[in-house]
Image (tube, rainbow, N blue to C red):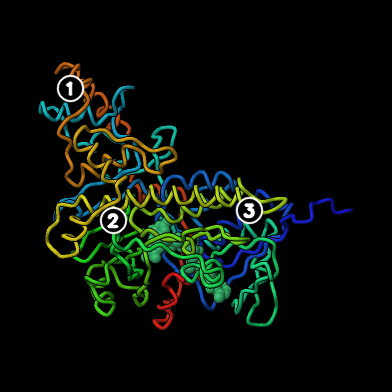
Amino acid sequence: MQDTSPPNAIRRVVIAGGGTAGWMVAALMSKLMGRQLDIRLVESEEIGTVGVGEATIPALHLFHEMLGINEAEFMSATQATFKLGIRFEGWHSPGVDYIHSFGKTGKDHWSADFQHFWLAAQRRGLARPYGDYCLEHRACETQRFGHAPDNGLNYAYHLDASRYASFLRGMSERAGVTRVEGKIREVEQAPSGDIAALRMENGTRVEGDLFIDCTGFRALLIGQTLGVPYEDWRHWLPCDRAVAVQTRTVREAPPFTRAIAHPFGWQWRIPLQHRVGNGLVYSSQALSDAEAPGTLLRHVEGDALMQPRVIQFQPGQRTRVWERNCIAVGLSSGFIEPLESTSIHLIQRAAIRLLRLFPTDALRAVDIQEFNRQTAHDLADIRDFIILHYHVTQRDDSEFWRHVRHMAIPETLQHRIELFAQTGRVFRPADGLFAENSWVQVLMGQGVMPTAYHPVADRMGQAELSAFLGGIRDDLERRLQRMPKHQDYVQRYCKAAPPDAHRPSPQPVPQGELAQHAPA
Ligand SMILES: Cc1cc2nc3c(=O)[nH]c(=O)nc-3n(C[C@H](O)[C@H](O)[C@H](O)COP(=O)(O)OP(=O)(O)OC[C@H]3O[C@@H](n4cnc5c(N)ncnc54)[C@H](O)[C@@H]3O)c2cc1C
């Protein structure tokens, strides 16, 4: 058949890197454009993946719907559990915890969100804790879980990152993606400056029209080859290291991630079916890489299944994620930090955005500008939300917390904090990831209590306000009582095969490779 495609048509897509980013892009692209494109993914088993990134947010459902993924099958394949939120322990001050749940709290009125009515009730001594009016919050506290239609919970997952990449790889290969194993030795550029091919260590060349850089922190294409600069955000987000270890499970998996504050940063605990993922996220100014593994091991439960490994990172963003015929997705495009688990979501957003702006007939500057504009907008919104957690702490027990508490913050964030503190109001910007209720939970959870609220709340009399709050709570407690325990639900719904039947967990990255983990 005669080829009628335009001369500059994009037909050969090369994805460099097979971590979560590479395989998410491959899965979506092959599902939706597999017939028009020749998609190849290059990865190196020897180099491996970053091996972390196991907590998600509810928007992942959309991605799975697009791929037609069966939930129970996916959860079983990735040893996943359900996640209804994050418990922030000691972020307000040592010993004080709160939960940022994914649910809706209470009921809003067209003129004012629920927190205004709750604040009015609190002033009159009628309110229970804010989280008592949110089903997901209560389900976290009581470790329960259930599916719609009975319960209608807003949830995400904890998943094994390497198994998730394997799961997506299987889907992608069945949809026609060709996997190329081996190390990329060199990235070849055409005289125009565009990327022409990846030259592999065994001497073969992988040519393409469009290259997706999913090589992680190495950023082989976008950073090392095309030299797109990286904007450093350490002045707002001082954590630049993590140390991670997997441990044996010693208790029932709760349906939430734990984020535990320490004097030098914070610690995550992510419960999976077959193990627990643990890590410290710290500032290299506050804790040394030599001390970090031992410190982590003193704060985990259960035997360690591997040696802890240190990962260096630089919070920030690539100033342009699409440059010439190369698009960076995943860690090569930037990394804020793991708090609030937004990186996998950003990969999802990038993959969907790429399909919406796909340069089918030719590369156009306007598409590239639009892609870069939307990406920068997403990152700034999430960045502000993450900085919020550090900045509004009441902690004063270390130099690390005193610094983040008093540091200068972006104006956009300063405005949102002041608006809330003075009026109780929060507005979600267009396309903003975190809804108003997320901001309210973190702000109040960390001690920012508004001095005023919307006057509409005072139009409710004592009895009416009390009945309003009581009705919400009775309804959700009834629904809660019908929910099984999370652990039992997981066992019945998506019990995974014994871990030995799967690939072993990722191997520790040799210490000598640490330097390569800083953004190029
Ligand atoms: C400490 C930490 C905790 C995190 N926690 C979360 C979380 O809870 N939730 C979340 O959403 N995100 C989290 N993230 C982010 C998440 O891990 C990443 O977004 C996700 O794993 C995607 O990584 P990636 O695919 O971009 O890179 P990688 O996993 O590093 O993959 C890079 C790929 O490129 C290949 N490659 C590199 N160089 C070459 C070469 N020369 N030749 C051939 N192949 C090559 C590698 O083999 C690999 O396949 C966390 C990140 C860190 C650092």
Q: Position of residue 205 (x, y in %)?
A: 70, 75
Q: Specify the label residue 466 is tagged with.
A: 1
Q: Which callout, 3 or 2, points at the residue further toward the start of the chain?
A: 3
The residue type indicated by label 2 comes to Arg
In contact (CB < 8 Å): disc 3 and disc 1: no
Q: Secondary structure at mark 1?
A: helix
Most extreme residue toward the front, as rendered? 192
Real-space CA distance between mark 1 and mark 2, rounded to the nearest whole angstrom: 33 Å
Real-space CA distance between mark 3 and mark 1, rounded to the nearest whole angstrom: 52 Å
Task: Please indicate whether residue 451 sits to the left or right of residue 513 in the image.
Answer: left
Most extreme residue toward the right, as rendered? 1
Q: Secondary structure at mark 2?
A: strand
User: Local crowd at mark 3 within 10 Å, few (<14), some, or many (≥20)?
Assistant: many
Q: Position of residue 226 (x, y in %)?
A: 56, 68
The residue type indicated by label 1 comes to Ser
Q: Nearer the viewer, residue 451 or 72?
A: 451
The residue type indicated by label 3 comes to Met
Task: Report the label total.
Answer: 3
Q: Nearer the viewer, residue 82 or 287?
A: 287
Q: Position of residue 33 (x, y in %)?
A: 68, 50
Is 12 above or below relative to 433?
below
The residue wearing badge 2 is 258
Q: Specify the label residue 414 is tagged with.
A: none
Q: Secondary structure at mark 3?
A: helix
3 or 1: mark nearer the eye? 3
The residue wearing badge 3 is 29
Q: Which callout, 3 or 1, points at the residue further toward the start of the chain?
A: 3
Q: Position of residue 310 (x, y in %)?
A: 35, 74
